[in-house]
Amino acid sequence: MKKVLVVEDNILNMELVLEILNAMDFEAKGAEDGKEALSIIEKEQYDLILMDIELPGMNGIEVKNNIKRKISYEKVPVIALTAYAMKGDKERLIALGFDDYMAKPIDVAEFIEKLNRYK
Amino acid sequence: MKALVVDDTTNDRMLLSTLLKSAGFDIKEAGNGFEALEKVGKEIPDIIISDVMMPEMDGFMLLRNLKKDNKTKDIPFILYTASYESNEDKELGLLLGASRYFIKPIDPGEFIDEIKAIIKEFKVGMIHPPEPEISDEEYLKKYGQRVSLKLESKIKNLEKEITKRKDAELRYRTLFEQSPDGVLILDPETALPIMFNDAACKQLGYSSEEFSRMHVWEYEARGTPEETKRHIERILREGWADFETQHRTKTGEIRYVMVTFKKFELAEKIVFNVIYRDVTERKQAENLRLEKERLEYASKAKSEFLASMSHELRTPLNSILGFSELMKQGIAGKLNEKQEHYTENIISSGKFLLNLINDILDLSKVEAGKIELVNEKISLPLTLDENISLIKERAARRKVNIIKEQSPEIEFIEVDKQRFKQVLFNLLDNAIKFSNPEGGIVTITTKKAGDNVEISVADRGIGIKPEDIEKLFQKFQQLNPEISCKYGGTGLGLAICRQIVELHGGKIWAESKYGEGSRFIFILPLKGIKVVNK
């Protein structure tokens, strides 16, 4: 079972994403900020990370950079999952080193389709 | 010992007097020959030291007169001159009976020693003062020569001096008159100009005749005349001032002016030298730059606000749409018919809200000038086909047939492709939406119209009442609540279309017969849009 870490400060959105991931048979866990996320990945190895951008403390870009700095996480895909969905946001985040991008609000069907590729 | 000093130049006379006083002489002074004769008449001095060139009676004439009088002919007489320095002059002086003939300047010590020696010689009677060895006739002839020669050279010098001064004046006058700045001499008491150059009156659009009668406060655009008067008084106390102000021209235009005031004395009257430098163009450029910065700042603040608003609205929508979708899919248990219907209502309202957010942001960006057109050369027929294929499915669902009527005159146009397609998509979408539910025809027409390319989308749907046509392109102006309910849409699509078309320098409008259908037309100027004739 692939393990997914969801970094998201909005608890309702966290619940939604975990719900879908569980229904898709992922082993999913949530972290509410960058600090928590970094302490989790110190202990466990995850296969995929979904990263909100607007977070308390470190923003999603900084958290992603810190994660990618770990050798064991160099190749782990980090997908931006964000409400920054204006023209140019996707290109900007991809350019900053995210492996993929999804805009909020998510289309559940599209979300499932995309996540299936990482199974 | 008594000495009489005769000199018309006060300074020279004082200098000589002081020198002699310090050597123990009693001094009497006279300003010319006549005065000297008068003084000698009252009291005979031990020695007379006289300048040559003096008004009324010069040194030669004084000497001649003294030598003619027995009472005075024995007084030692010294001529001391700066201007009669030639040998002939000296010769004449000695011929007239002068004891010595000195050319200025002479070393003071030597001078005093000489004088003391002469007096001593006279006292012991060793030497009598020389008698004039010259007849009146001869004297007058020589004297006439000397004086006229002297006058001639004096006049020549004066002429030289005058030419020099004229040159200097011409230089200053040219500087003054050719100056691009207004330069004037101002009377601080009246605040009227005493003199001024062309630029001073031209800057303000007055003739020099008019300007010569104008007080400073008549063209000063800042403050009251009282305040201007007080300002001038203050500058008079402080001596100078540099400041920026505004002047009002004859036609009422406001000019920005850098002003310099400097106090100076002119023929015992205190005046100002004033310079007016017109800096309006520089000032306007500066204002323009500030305004541009302000707008850029405002625009940046607006787009930051838009970005954060978009983010804040999308975040809760994620839960609304996501959870309702999960519910609808029965993840939380199978729904009954009503529950499913309600859930669908939540989803469709949520999606509508999302579209609204997207449209509002898009429109705001266009209105804020945030949209920069990225023009490229595109094929008009190909782009139409792309648009049609995007909407084909929707058209088929509503049994609408899309027909193209293309002019072969226009193949390529230069536009922002994304934005152009957005306009076309909007018009096609509307045309399909408002076509008869039983099916209909939507026609796209392209043609060259004068200097424009004209593109129109026509339907045979419900049409628009004439009084409603005006409202079509305004924001949130769906014609009635029934329509928005029945046909959906945010009421922003046509407003966005208009903004985009106008950004391209074009125009968009609608024609309609109520009940028979509508036609939406937009034109884009060919100027800047390249057209290739087939």
Image (cartoon, helix red, strand yellow):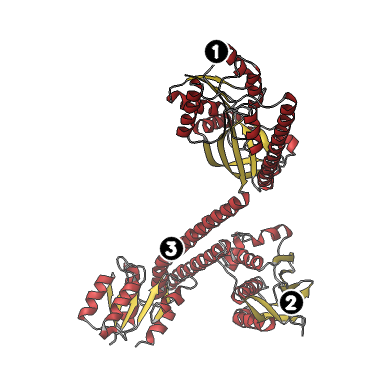
Q: Nearer the viewer, residue A52 or B480?
A: A52
Q: Are marks 1 and 2 in contact (CB under 8 Å)?
A: no
N-terminal label among 3 and 1: 1
Quadrant for residue B418, please give it: bottom right
Which amino acid lies under the numbered mark 1 shown in the image of this protein?
A: Glu
Q: Which element is circle 1 on?
A: loop
Query: Among all residues in the image, which is located at the extreme top?
Result: B42
Quadrant for residue B145, please give it: top right
Q: Which element is circle 3 on?
A: helix
N-terminal label among 1 and 2: 1
Q: Nearer the viewer, residue B526 or B246?
A: B246
Which residue in the protein does label 1 denote? Answer: B43
Q: Are marks 3 and 1 in contact (CB under 8 Å)?
A: no
Q: Chain of mark 2?
A: B
Co-location on one chain, circles 1 and 2? yes
Query: Is A20 rendered above or below residue B280?
Result: below
Which amino acid lies under the numbered mark 3 shown in the image of this protein?
A: Ser
Q: Are marks 3 and 2 in contact (CB under 8 Å)?
A: no
Query: Is B277 rendered above or below residue B98?
Result: below
Q: Chain of mark 3?
A: B
Residue B202: image location, x then y, percent: 71, 43
Kindly identify which numbered label has been placed on residue A112: none
In the figure, is residue B362 to the left or right of B200?
left
| Cα distance between the residues tagged 1 and 2 | 128 Å
Which residue in the protein does label 2 denote? Answer: B445
In the figure, is residue B275 to the left or right of B113?
right
Which amino acid lies under the numbered mark 2 shown in the image of this protein?
A: Thr
Quadrant for residue B498, please give it: bottom right
Which residue in the protein does label 3 denote? Answer: B308
